[in-house]
Amino acid sequence: MSLLKPFSKLPGLNTANILLVENEEQFQQKLADTVVLQEKTVNVNVRLARSLPLPMENEESRPRIDLVVFIIHLTSELSFQSAETSLKYLDPGYFQGKVCFLVTSARNVSVPPERLVSVRKLAASLHCPLLCAEDQTTEGVTTAAHRLLAILKVAAGLVPMATGLYLSTLTRCTVPSDIDQQNFE
Amino acid sequence: MIRRIYLTSMLNDAVIDYCSLSRFQLHHGKARCSKSTSVFFSVMEERSSIVKTPLNNVLAQRRSKSYRRSMRSCVEATNLGYTSGHLTVLRIPRSRRTPKSRDITKQVDPDQVALLVRKEWELSYVTPLYQFRHTQLKSYSKHLSAFIVSEKQQGLAIEVGQELGFKVNFSVVLGLAETDEDAETVFIQILSRQAFAAKDDAQKVVWSGWLTCVNGDLEFLRSLPSEFVSLPLLCTRGPESLTVLVKSWFEKTFDCCFGPLGINSANLQWLAALWIGCHPTINIQYLKLVWTLPTLPPMDVKYTIHPQDAWELWDSVRQDDTTDVSIEEVTRFIKGLQSHFFRHFRIELSAGSLKQVSTALGSSHHSGKIKIASPTYITTILQLLTECALLKMPI
């Protein structure tokens, strides 16, 4: 089983690498362009994938991936299922602050709320942050890129005094039943 | 004592200075501490996404201690909100009781039932109505007809009670309410004389609508103050102009809000499971599901299944538990249909969204249109729709 390992390669100087995993391959391109344009001080490399595992041919030339972002479109069930199956191909070391879930169309009326709840449960069980993004407008894409860059810089070790693990304890997703437990007991 | 804490915001690179001043005053041995906190934000770069956390914790008042402990495994908490000072949680059920076929005509007048079935209704949600009295329906009819006529003929003063071109009928449909907390269903009809009709011709129904509440969330209904009546589901049929007029009259008279109610794909799947479960008792003749796939141009897939095959699949998915249907069984049933389709056509239907479900017993569209063809399972369908309306409604 070809797991993606977080620390098997050496990091580059002043470089951060992000991997965007999305089944539909439509939002990742826009997001990649915006991320690269926004960041001026650090070299950001964006790699795109449809699902994990990544192809073996690129194994040697691929740099160390600092942050893996799973983009889930709530309008289709397939998006969520594909992200779930891809999770198996990540080394457990990634779940200490190097994985993030990005969800689109969470406000959409036709989306059943159960789907967002199940994504939240998944993110909460893996101690990962869950971001909601608006992919139809440019401001939404810019905001999402801004947030991802902030997490990426911490995950790549470019922010002094902050590590991915520390950040993930602050930004991890919680599920409504946790609040439920707190209030009703 | 001044403490300074530096926090790095995770959403942007702003540095927050947090100063807390606490003064201790000693009065004859008693220590009194008054604290004043002030928070300074010094922004290093342009702020585009910032989240402010409240400085005080929002206190939750609990109504009763034994809160659904037994049901915890079968509901999913989604919305936490305040209804008149009490914390209410509207939950999405994960399992529902199997519907029993009931002859609704024993409870409800058959003529009134005939008004509700075999017509396509458009759904909206309604917030609770202030001081709506079931006893004053006649005066409501007069006011509404005067309102409609005055809106149609702008600028002309209309007296309430005059002979008008539009006549409104408010009536109560007794028997649809399931619990004591449900308000009785109100049926509204607008009749109008046709243009160029002879003087003695009967007026025809041009618009009809009904407000109902079937098995609404008890916790929510009990938490409402006594002046409010909750009839969260509105079904309308007729010209859009009249619907808008009726809604604006209700908004002005009872201080409520209306909004469109869609049926999302999870609820459409519940309806499909409900109708297929009825197959042994009533022949549904076909099960038709319509999906829309996000291709360019968008592709519609109409998937019609023979009822006997669908019934066999449903029966194999159902475990022997005859009292409850759980969401996992419904999901497994739909996944079975989707994987069968994939095997033949190589099209993954779960990449799209379910738009419409129809059988001979009724049809439902995700934009909020429902048609109930047979009165046997009407209460189960209305219960599901009432739940949708209560969940959609802004608390």
Image (tube, coloured by chain):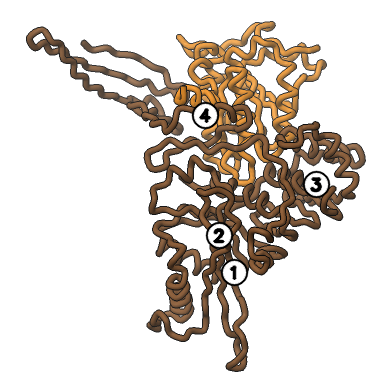
Would you place residue A90 above or below residue A180 in this image?
A: above
Depth order, front residue of A143/B315: B315
| Whether label 4 touches label 1, CB < 8 Å | no
Label 4 is placed on what type of residue?
His
Residue ID for mark 3 = B276
Do marks 2 and 1 both belong to one polypeptide chain?
A: yes
Do marks 1 and 3 both belong to one polypeptide chain?
A: yes
Residue ID for mark 4 = A146
Residue ID for mark 1 = B208
Kindly indicate the quadrant of the structure image that contains residue A33: top right
Q: CA distance from mark 2 to mark 1?
A: 13 Å
Please name which of the two marks, 2 or 3, marks the residue nearer to the observer.
Answer: 2
Please name which of the two marks, 4 or 1, marks the residue nearer to the observer.
Answer: 1
Label 3 is placed on what type of residue?
Ile
Identify the residue shown where x is 42% and y is 81%. B161
Do marks 4 and 1 both belong to one polypeptide chain?
A: no
Residue ID for mark 2 = B185
Depth order, front residue of A172/B76: B76
Q: Is residue B108 left or right of residue B21?
A: right
Would you place residue B259 above or below residue B197 in this image?
A: above
Residue A12, position in %: x, y? 61, 11
Please name which of the two marks, 2 or 4, marks the residue nearer to the observer.
Answer: 2
Q: Secondary structure at mark 1?
A: strand
Kindly indicate the quadrant of the structure image that contains residue A45: top right
Residue B226, position in %: x, y? 39, 50
Q: Secondary structure at mark 2?
A: strand
